[in-house]
Image (cartoon, rainbow, N blue to C red):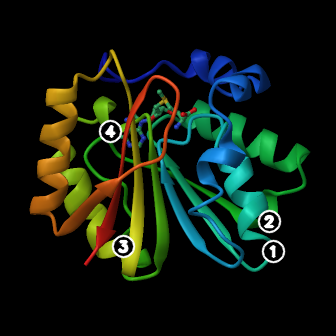
Amino acid sequence: MSPRVCPWWLGPLLANPLRKLLQDPAAILGPYVREGMTVLEPGPGMGFFTLEAARRVGPRGRVVAVDVQPRMLEGLRRRATRAGLADRVETRAARAESLGVEDLAGKVDVVLALLMVHELPDAARFFAEVHPALAPGGKVLFVEPRGHVTPAAFEESLAAAERAGLRRGPGPKVWRSLTAVLERA
Ligand SMILES: C[S@@+](CC[C@H](N)C(=O)[O-])C[C@H]1O[C@@H](n2cnc3c(N)ncnc32)[C@H](O)[C@@H]1O
């Protein structure tokens, strides 16, 4: 595993409910995730945002959560089952260089790229893979941790997203984060 990948044993800490006091998933996802949507969440960890997305899409929607660490996905499945949401959360194992979401081409309403792009070996490849998965008008909620990621590095990722065919717009306010919303033109 690349040293930039957050270790799996930090998963429970990231999913700790106290984090909601600083980064509230309901407030952050509320404007973007609606009933019946198909949501793709790369790098979900143990599901801090995933469970809220699953509640919002309801029984007719689905959340496809793709992580490179099997232990993160195990934790996420456990938490989704406990919350009664497992029926609408699909977990998938990613390879370091690919999410493996070709089957979702044109079907995804929202991609949640939350605090994970800085862990990838190649942001440009990530956005090039995400773009075809989006439905026309589909959006990427892109959030990176301020500090870990400098404004200049965030800007580079945004430029890569634009080269992949995504149009950038302002993102929501998220505690200690750099944010943008990217849209498939
Ligand atoms: C800092 S954690 C953030 C987890 C979650 N989004 C949150 O905010 O609680 C980053 C996550 O991205 C995952 N990740 C790292 N590289 C990845 C890759 N190439 N493909 C998919 N997931 C990856 C890590 O395993 C980890 O679960």
Considering only order in the chain, which callout, 2 or 1, is on the residue closer to the N terminus? Answer: 1
Quarter of the image with the C terminus is bottom left
Considering only order in the chain, which callout, 2 or 3, is on the residue closer to the N terminus? Answer: 2
- Crowd around label 3: few <14 · some 14–19 · many ≥20 (10 Å): many
Q: Which residue does the numbered mark 4 point to in the structure image? A: 117
Q: How many marks?
A: 4
Q: How far apart are the alpha carbons under marks 3 and 2?
A: 22 Å
Q: How far apart are the alpha carbons under marks 1 and 3?
A: 21 Å
61 vs 121, nearest the viewer: 61
**Residue occupying image coordinates x 22% and y 66%:** 166
Residue 101 spot, x, y in % from top left? 39, 66
- Crowd around label 1: few <14 · some 14–19 · many ≥20 (10 Å): some
Asked whether residue 122 appears in the rendered view, the answer is no
**Mark 4 in CB contact with mark 1 (< 8 angstroms):** no
| Dot in front, 1 or 2 | 1
Question: What residue type is disc 4 on?
Answer: Val
Residue 144 spot, x, y in % from top left? 37, 33
Considering only order in the chain, which callout, 1 or 4, is on the residue closer to the N terminus? Answer: 1
**150 left or right of 26 in image:** left
**Mark 3 in CB contact with mark 2 (< 8 angstroms):** no
Question: What residue type is disc 3 on?
Answer: Ala
Question: What residue type is disc 2 on?
Answer: Asp
Q: How far apart are the alpha carbons under marks 1 and 2?
A: 8 Å
